[in-house]
Image: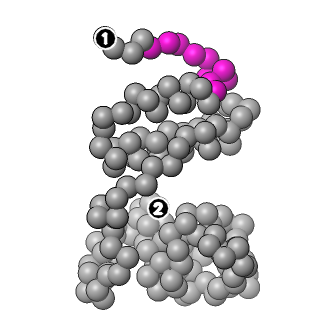
Amino acid sequence: MGIEAKEININQLNATDLAAFVKTLLGYTTKMVEFVLCGTRAFLRFLHKEGIVTADLSESLPNVQSRKQTRIPSVWSRDDLQKLIDAIDRGNPSGKRDYAMILLAARMGLRCIDIKRLTFSAFNWSENYFEFAQSKTKKPLRLPISKTIFNILNL
């Protein structure tokens, strides 16, 4: 007694179809559901951004909060943080990005959500700062671009 797959034109995809998809994830671990929904949400955003579909259905998917015990610790020892930073391969673009993101969190105290929402337009390279509205407080924040970050991006 399986679920019958139906073929849909991607432009006809709707919130009801996504709800049916979410139901297929029942029985999987919370982490697995969170992983699948995160990837699906990113794919839906991509389809909309690229103009492949007209509606952005990414917000139709529910957010799944995993238990606190499964989260990365919010406080790291200096040694553990240095080990994490040293382990990042900065020899490729994604490694440089990861390194910059870790430094923004560890050295500048940015929240993960604020790092995630940063766009290239937030950076004023000629005046050496970046600016964004904090997600928690909604207050604008202007911070200097550190020499380390600047050098990582080879600007």
Side of 119 relative to 115 (left or right): right
SS at mark 2? helix
Image quadrant of residue 27?
Answer: top left
Image x and y of residue 69, in percent: 29, 64
Please say if 138 is above or below 107. above
Image x and y of residue 135, in percent: 63, 70
SS at mark 1? loop
Please say if 46 is above or below 13. below
Image quadrant of residue 43?
Answer: top right
Of residues 128 and 20, the one nearer the viewer is 20
Q: What residue type is labelled 2?
A: Pro
Side of 13 relative to 131 (left or right): left
Which quadrant of the rendered structure holds the C terminus?
bottom right
Image x and y of residue 51, in percent: 71, 35
Give the Cα distance between marks 2 and 1: 46 Å
Q: Is residue 44 magenta?
A: no
Residue at 61% over, 39% down: 60
Colour scheme: one colour
Residue 102 disc label: none
Of residues 29 and 101, the one nearer the viewer is 29
Image x and y of residue 15, in percent: 62, 30
Residue at 33% over, 49% down: 31
Q: Name the residue under label 2.
A: 93
Q: Residues within 10 Å of mark 1 (few under 14, many from 20)?
A: few
Q: Mark 1 points at which residue?
A: 1
Please say if 38 is above or below 85. above
Q: Would residue 117 be seen by someone viewing this image from the given angle? A: yes
Q: Which amino acid does label 1 sit on?
A: Met
Highlighted range, magenta: 5-14
Dot placed on the residue nearer the N-terminal end, 2 or 1: 1
